[in-house]
Image (tube, grey):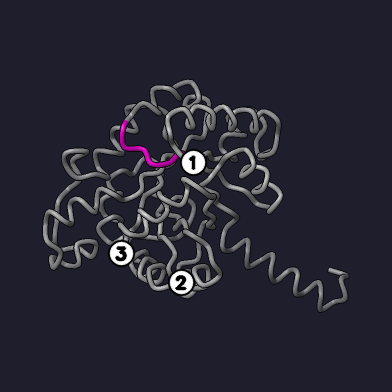
Amino acid sequence: MSCLQARKIKEAVKTRPVFGPFSKIADPAVIEVLGHAGFDFVILDMEHGPNSAETLQNLIRAAEIAGIAPIVRVPEGDLGIISKVLDIGAAGVQVPQITTATAVRQAVRVAKFSPQGERGVCRFVRSAEYSSMEKQIYFKQANEGLLIIQLEGREALENLDEILNEPGIDMIFVGPYDLSQSLGVPGQTTHPLVVEKTKEILAACQKNGIAVGNFTETPEQSRFWVEQGLRYMSFSVDVGLLYEGCRQVVSNLRGGRG
């Protein structure tokens, strides 16, 4: 299931943008709601959320049921968790704070089986259907999982060409908040400097045939970046969507008085 979802996302971004929120609520019902609402993917957040490998398994099951691709953002600096979340069925991993080509190689090494990498092998895992899947089919399909690299700071910008020359990257994700901080305008995700550097990353990725995405918080921001050519569009966070929906309902109940 996970390889089919990864393949679907890879094919989709060739012709259209795909949309999905980050998720911090460790409840499978929330993931099902996001899928039934029509999102293409959900980013299950282990970097800035309460999710663990134990909670992720049922969230991934819920995503598969609802037809939404489960992508896991792993914690910064914890490459060892990558094989674990892929073993339990994630359609892909999103690796934060990548700044060098060496870091890309390390991520590819643990995310891919040979010959692309050296991911630890175990057939008795959920992604291999608990050993019922034929070995060679499993290894081939597993290597189709999405590897999404986050670029978020000055060092990554300085090493951009070397990073993009590394094989194995499926998509680049620009982290606008961390990028804004590194550029001296913390939190100003629409600042001209942030927009300029994001466009530089986009231009470089387009030359290399790599899809690019980022995080937005308003439909207007999303439309702007889709018009620029971004395809992997993360929109808001489940807790933010819940808050905004509830706030609007309360405002309407009170006659628009807030």
Vertical position of residue 147 compared to residue 151: above or below: below
Q: Does the magenta stretch include residue 168?
A: yes
Residue denoted by label 1: 173
Q: Which amino acid is tagged 2? A: Asp
The residue pinned by badge 2 equals 27
Q: Spatial distance from mark 1 to mark 3, Cα to Cα?
A: 24 Å
Which one is closest to the eye, mark 1 or mark 3?
3
The magenta-colored residue range is 167-173
Image coordinates for residue 231, horizontal then vertical, percent: 53, 45
Residue positioned most to the bottom:
253
Give the number of the mark in front: 2 or 1.
Answer: 1
* Residue 113: x %, y % from top left: 19, 45
Q: Indicate left or right for 2 with 240 as reference.
A: left
Residue carrying label 3: 1
Q: In this view of the protein, which residue sits in the foreground, 121 or 182?
A: 121
Q: Tell whether label 1 touches label 2 (CB within 8 Å).
A: no
Quadrant of the rendering where the C terminus is positioned: bottom right
**Which residue is rendered at x = 19% and y = 62% of the image?**
128
Q: What residue sits 49% from the left and 41% below the top? A: 173
- The number of callouts visible is 3
Secondary structure of the residue carrying numbered label 3: loop
Q: Which amino acid does label 3 sit on?
A: Met
